[in-house]
Amino acid sequence: MNELDRNFINALNRKVQKTPPVWIMRQAGRYLPEYRKVRSNFKNFLDMCKTPEVCCELVLQPIQRYDFDAAIIFSDILTIPDALGLGVSFVEGKGPIFSNPIRRPEDISNIADFNPESLDYVYTTAELTRKELDTSIPLIGFSGSPWTLAAYSIEGSSSKNFDLTKSFIENHSLDAHRFLEILTDACFEYLKRQIISGVDVIQIFDSWANLLSDQQYLEYSLKYIKKLLDKLSKDPITCKTPTILFAREPKCNLNEFKLNNLSCYGMYTSIYPSNAINIFEGSHALQGNLDPKILLDEDAIIKETVLKLLSKFKNYPGYIFNLGHGITPDINPDKVKVLVDAIREFGS
Ligand code: CP3
């Protein structure tokens, strides 16, 4: 990587910078007309994820349009449950559907061993993309957290309350832990191969952190995120790769996220920046957390809100601009340009 353009890596290394790096979660997606055009060639979303040349093109689309400071592999967090034989497909308007969800403890015993090679298509996407992407732009690889993958696998689909998942962990706690161990090992092997294939940074998405109470969060989610980070830090191949954790509205105290072996904490929309700054005190880089809904507003409001957020993190050692959750399909792509311009003007 070119030393001059390592804005994102500098932030992960906790450097104060005049202009923070910017990328946005779900930056390649349905809000972009060029994405929708490519997407229309595939009936099944996962078939598209299994076509590395196409995924590579999708990674590059938002980089070409906005000159973001980081790219993220085009794939999905549900590749692991799919590889475990749970039969994932995406149904228009309904989200992911599992044909073999985990409903009974026996279902866990019957899961196929995770074969990391079965996700070769993701590693090929990483290799191809790393070749095509400008050398100055870091490439982010990712996985879901073990808990978030377990929640989808047990529920068998998206759901408002995840009632099946909640009753499974209450009635079959030991089995749930057994499943979380399997998923932790799978995430490690998967992320390791992404790193071997050229990704520069890892992000873990704990998108269903909000389902758990404070105590449950520590027991069912954070415990396994810690295990995963620990494994990554002990392996000579993965130990140097910076790590970001994004958790959606976790109920536990923010202090719990001052984790060893974590480089950056990704703040969900509801977190007050001043609170995060006071708690982390520079121990970790911080990423986030503009409410994606602001992008539905007028340009002047977007600019004003962005500048407010930037001024809060002005002296924070290691700040990465991002949204507080993924961008939604209803956003006008021009609004993202307004956001990026406001950030770049701030530091110039
Ligand atoms: O630039 C990028 O970030 C694209 C790569 C990416 C996708 N999914 C592509 C995708 C990433 C990093 C993800 C992560 C992901 N997938 C998460 C964590 C992030 C978060 O939002 O909390 C989650 C929870 C999923 C699971 C998932 N994938 C759902 C629930 C859905 C359907 C609903 C939805 O948000 O669209 C998907 C499908 C999906 N994954 C799409 C994309 C671009 C849309 C599929 C389509 O075009 O039909």
Image (cartoon, rainbow, N blue to C red):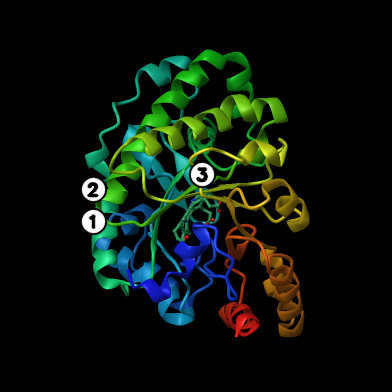
Task: Give the numbered dot on residue 124.
Answer: 1
Label 3 sits on residue: 262
Label 2 sits on residue: 120
Three-letter code for the amino acid on which mark 1 is drawn:
Thr
Q: Considering only vertical position in the picture, is 251 above or below 296?
A: above
Q: Measured from the top left, where is residue 99 in percent x and y?
A: 41, 35
CA separation, marks 2 and 1? 6 Å
CA separation, marks 3 and 1? 26 Å
Q: Which of marks 3 and 1 is in front?
A: 3
**Does residue 339 appear to the left or right of 235 in the view shown?**
right
SS at circle 3: loop
- For mark 1, does the 10 Å Cα neighbourhood hold few (<14), some (14 to 19), or many (20 or more) residues? many
Between 19 and 227, the one nearer to me in the picture: 19
Q: Considering only vertical position in the picture, is 141 above or below 54?
A: above
**Residue positioned 33% across, 68% down in the render:** 41
Corner quadrant of residue 168: top right
Q: Do the residues bearing badges 2 and 3 touch, measured as CB atoms within 8 Å?
A: no
